[in-house]
Amino acid sequence: MAKFCTKCGKPLKDGKPCDCEKNKKEEVNTNNIGENIINIFKEIFITPFDTIKKYSNTNNIKLAFILSGISALVFGLFTYLFMDSLNKGLTEDINELSNALGGSLYSVSNVPFFEPFIIGVITMIAFLFALCLMSRLFMSTVFKSEKRFRDYLALYGNATSITILTMILACIGCFISYKVGIVIALIGTILYFVSTTQTLLKHYEINKERIPYSLALTITTTYIITFIVLVIAVSTVIANQTSTMYY
């Protein structure tokens, strides 16, 4: 005769204890957004895979939207600080070379805040949207995963907690050098994709044999779409500045 859990009534397999208590502890109170934001930042670097799994369901879609928005704002700030640091760094390098050759020195020009910031925000939003869309297309439609667009949005959106923290460090790094800033940003990007990939493998029902193909297609097309959006955004800013100059 089969034995059943005395707390939830679930059939017990091979005499093993029921995991209902463990699952209950892992449940997230989706109504407390502020507490969830604090908790996800506390847990993401300690147990990244379990943390992403814990929060990456459609019940936490609001949290995903909020974190995605914060990530876009932080990336916009990083874009400005990186461009400003790059401008100053390259000017200093040119002046050192020019001084060694006996040439004239160049003054450092100021990088405006608004345009780089907006470009960064738009780029991050386009990246996350394209990543969810391409995941839905290749992993679900082509490779027969049952996950929907909302599922991928919950996954990638809540995983941006990694991006937010590393981008804040990258912003600080830009005050030291643009090289430090971009290295930290690249490390953050790698951490982001490693964590989301592991979550896809373990919890998102993606066939292990097909995951390299689906990820390759997803990431490649995502970066192509993001690059196109970036070019359009930069071209629009340049066109507006040019028209203002001749107005």
Image (spheres, rainbow, N blue to C red):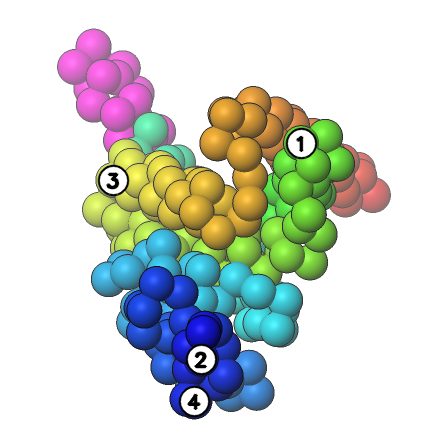
Let me know if residue 236 appears in the view: yes
Q: In the rendered image, which residue does mark 1 sit on?
A: 143
Q: Residue furthest right?
A: 247
Element type at mark 2: loop
Report helix, strand or loop for mark 1: loop
Q: Which comes before the other along the chain, label 3 or label 4?
A: 4
Nearer the observer, disc 4 or disc 1? Answer: 4
The image's mark for residue 4 is 2
Return the residue at label 3. Answer: 180
Report, in whole angstroms, how far the alpha carbon at label 2 lies from the one at label 4.
Answer: 9 Å
Stretch in magenta: 91-106
Q: Quadrant of the C terminus?
A: top right
Query: Is residue 95 found inside the magenta-colored segment of the image?
Result: yes
Residue matched to label 4 = 7
Quadrant for residue 226, please give it: top right
Q: CA distance from mark 2 to mark 1?
A: 37 Å
